[in-house]
Image (tube, helix red, strand yellow):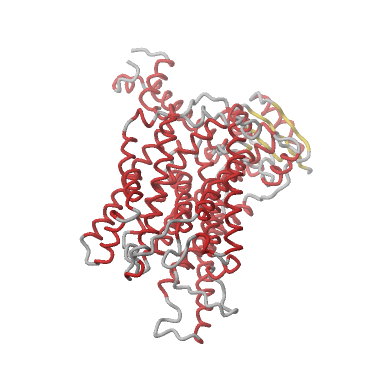
């Protein structure tokens, strides 16, 4: 049977190149540059709405922090035993969010999942900014912010006795490592794109990109070094991300507080971190897709893959959550059991049940393709999932402190004051402001990686078609061209 | 013998690799593959089949960073703790190993990442001044082949390039 080249090409595409539908493989490379560079100049008007609203929220946070700084932590309604409140709950939530940025950029890079390429850059940037936001809470909740260096592992010549056995010191070290490493990973991965910006920009922007691109010229020697460096950094970042949230969990698990002293906390925290991070990536995906007109690159099939990944993470988190309840319920620690009962029936019960519903039941909606491919529904769903994950952090912190070993803690119910809420709201403003600024100044989609993705797919297709055309028997046997 | 540079721009990688293949088989006197540089908008590892494997030394930096920074980090923490001898420890270890392992692990990652980044900048020769023979299309969708060669064989190289229908040929000081 004689087949035309075109027929074979169509058959090969049907059989082997399903992945191509993630993104249109025929986009011209020059168009990729043009589309993505356009996002640095003319975003939709919604960009400025988001930016101004974020700035206003940030100023609310700054005002509350100034008031708290001048008056003392009492205005935040923090007292003994409620020493942490929303500050530490939100700190954990922000720290956790960054993990999915690393998962998308590093783990999926190592595993050669190329659908990540149009979306990993903004996820990586998200990691950096969530860490900056989280670090802010370390200072805020101290009250005496000028003494923050007590938590840093530094030499003892000033006789401040830093406690190296404290998970708080490990925490500061881990977060410092994660923040700087993420920043390096983000920057190095961006150098080829900065060179594209340099080659196309004019005025003061050209000077900025000229400086930041370091004279990159895309030579084969530079690419060879780049490939090894990027892979090596990805290999370091994966265990780092896991270690950071495991260490954050030891802030609780290493204590004797009933409700905190739980063996499964490290994997539980890591799973929760990845889950909430993926939900934020979906939210940002939808916002960026509309704001910067990225419809051709941030496609529905990619959104669907993200949704599936989120569903998987939600199920892992749910399992670990149930394990935590079961081990406490069937364990021999009556104080921990009482703390669990208090969460489900005490003053915080509505939030605890809402957390379980949003975190474990609502994700089942992601099992349906109609939901996964509906952008407005996914936007609402991703925000609700994240709200559930924020509640989870709050439900770990506050109800537990309200039901400790000593009975005097039991009548100390605490509700966060407007100062705490204001600073939490300010952190959202701070993150959004930084993130939107980043997307306006730097390409939020990796241009060279999208080109690589298209090049690899085209090469694969060409190779397969050539194989089929040169081997007609195989084509007939495989039913490809018949 | 003085040397100069020539750069040809091609619309795709296949054309560029065909030109390099012809250059290789032409056996021009004094021509070395080490003097050929491919400039491209994406990485083309397959070019190593033609130009030979380019040495990458980044991993050496990584190795030393991941080995020595955690050692230094451990010593840094342990020496700080050693001054705690003046503080009553109630029978606990002055230099406790399990918590120090956590910190050492973070130093291991820190050292690995920092030294890898440093190695990359050194090995990729960044920051560098951009060459004169650079075309902005190389960062968009075209492939450039830059060759440093003796003036005597330069006309032959240009002829070879011309056979492969380049979009542009530039020459002069780099």
Q: Is residue A11 above or below residue A40?
A: above
- Residue B142 rendering spot, x and y as whole percentages: 63, 30
Q: Quadrant of the C terminus of chain A?
A: top left
Q: Nearer the viewer, residue A30 or A169?
A: A169
Farthest-out residue, front: A411
Task: Tell me which residue sits at (40%, 15%) in the image.
Answer: A7
Q: Is residue A328 visible?
A: yes
Task: Tell me which residue sits at (52%, 74%) in the image.
Answer: A162
Q: Quadrant of the N terminus of chain A?
A: top left
Task: Give left or right: position of A380 versus A325.
Answer: right
- Residue A289 rendering spot, x and y as whole percentages: 52, 32
Q: Nearer the viewer, residue A165 or B75?
A: A165
Q: Nearer the viewer, residue B135 or A431?
A: A431
Q: Is residue A324 above or below residue B164?
A: below
Q: Is residue B22 visible?
A: no
Quadrant for residue B116, please give it: bottom right
Task: Give left or right: position of A471 versus A328.
Answer: right
Count how many numbered circles sit on residues in the image. Answer: 0
- Residue A39 rendering spot, x and y as whole percentages: 61, 33
Q: Is residue A133 above or below residue A194?
A: below
Q: Is residue B122 above or below residue B9?
A: below
- Residue A224 rendering spot, x and y as whole percentages: 56, 45
Q: Nearer the viewer, residue B30 or A29?
A: A29
Task: Give left or right: position of A81 versus B140.
Answer: left
Quadrant for residue A471, please give it: top left
Task: Tell me which residue sits at (70%, 48%) in the image.
Answer: B128
């Amino acid at each position: 049977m004689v087949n035309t080249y075109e027929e074979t090409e169509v058959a090969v595409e049907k059989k082997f190149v399903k992945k191509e539908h993630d993104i249109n493989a025929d986009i011209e490379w020059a168009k990729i540059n043009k589309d993505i560079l356009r996002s640095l100049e003319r975003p939709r008007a919604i960009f400025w709405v988001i930016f101004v609203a974020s700035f206003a929220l940030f100023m609310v946070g700054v005002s509350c922090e100034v008031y708290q700084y001048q008056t003392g932590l009492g205005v935040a309604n923090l007292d003994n035993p409620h020493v942490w409140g929303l500050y530490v709950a939100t700190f954990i939530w922000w720290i956790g969010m960054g993990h999915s940025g690393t998962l998308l950029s590093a783990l999926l890079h190592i595993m050669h999942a190329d659908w990540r390429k149009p979306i990993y850059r903004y996820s990586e940037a998200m990691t950096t900014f969530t860490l900056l936001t989280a670090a802010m809470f370390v200072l805020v909740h101290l009250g005496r912010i000028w003494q923050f260096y007590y938590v840093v592992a530094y030499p003892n010549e000033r006789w401040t006795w830093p406690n190296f056995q404290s998970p708080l010191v490990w925490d500061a070290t881990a977060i410092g490592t994660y923040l700087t490493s993420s920043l390096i990973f983000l920057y190095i991965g961006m150098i080829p794109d900065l060179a594209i910006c340099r080659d196309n920009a004019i005025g003061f922007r050209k000077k900025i990109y000229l400086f930041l691109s370091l004279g990159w010229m895309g030579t084969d020697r530079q690419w060879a070094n780049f490939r090894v460096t990027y892979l090596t950094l990805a290999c370091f970042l994966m265990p780092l991300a896991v270690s950071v949230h495991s260490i954050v969990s030891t802030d609780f698990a290493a204590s004797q507080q009933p409700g905190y002293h739980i063996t499964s906390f490290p994997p539980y925290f890591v799973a929760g971190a990845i889950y909430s991070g993926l939900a934020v990536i979906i939210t940002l995906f939808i916002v960026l897709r509309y704001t910067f007109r990225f419809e051709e690159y941030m496609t529905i099939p990619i959104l669907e893959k993200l949704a599936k990944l989120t569903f998987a993470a939600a199920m892992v988190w749910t399992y670990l959550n149930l394990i935590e309840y079961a081990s406490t319920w069937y364990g021999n620690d009556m104080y921990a059991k009482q703390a669990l009962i208090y969460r489900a029936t005490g003053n915080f019960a509505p939030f605890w049940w809402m957390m379980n519903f949003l975190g474990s039941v609502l994700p089942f909606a992601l099992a349906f393709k109609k939901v996964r491919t509906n952008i407005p529904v996914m936007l609402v769903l991703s925000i609700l999932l994240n709200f559930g994950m924020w509640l989870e952090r709050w439900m770990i912190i506050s109800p537990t402190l309200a039901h400790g070993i000593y009975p005097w803690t039991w009548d100390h119910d605490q509700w966060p004051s407007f100062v705490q809420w204001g600073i939490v709201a300010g952190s959202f403003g701070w993150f959004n402001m930084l993130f939107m600024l980043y997307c306006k100044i730097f390409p939020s989609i990796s241009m060279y990686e999208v080109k690589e993705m298209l090049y690899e797919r085209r090469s694969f297709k060409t190779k397969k078609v050539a194989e089929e055309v040169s081997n007609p028997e195989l084509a007939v046997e495989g039913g490809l061209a018949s | 013998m003085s040397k100069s540079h020539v750069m040809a721009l091609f619309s795709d990688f296949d054309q560029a690799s065909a030109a390099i293949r012809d250059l290789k088989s032409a056996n021009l006197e004094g021509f070395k593959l080490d003097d050929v540089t491919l400039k491209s908008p994406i990485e083309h590892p397959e070019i190593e089949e033609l130009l030979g494997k380019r040495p990458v030394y980044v991993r050496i930096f990584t190795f030393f960073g991941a080995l020595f920074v955690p050692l230094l980090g451990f010593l840094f923490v342990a020496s700080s703790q050693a001054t705690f001898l003046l503080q009553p420890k109630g029978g606990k270890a002055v230099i406790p190993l399990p918590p120090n392992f956590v910190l050492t692990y973070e130093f291991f990652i820190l050292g690995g990442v920092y030294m890898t980044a440093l190695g990359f900048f050194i090995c990729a020769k960044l920051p560098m001044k951009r060459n004169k023979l650079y075309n902005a299309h190389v960062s968009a969708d075209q492939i450039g082949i830059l060759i440093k060669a003796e003036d005597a064989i330069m006309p032959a190289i240009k002829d070879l390039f011309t056979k492969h229908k380049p979009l542009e040929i530039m020459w002069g000081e780099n």
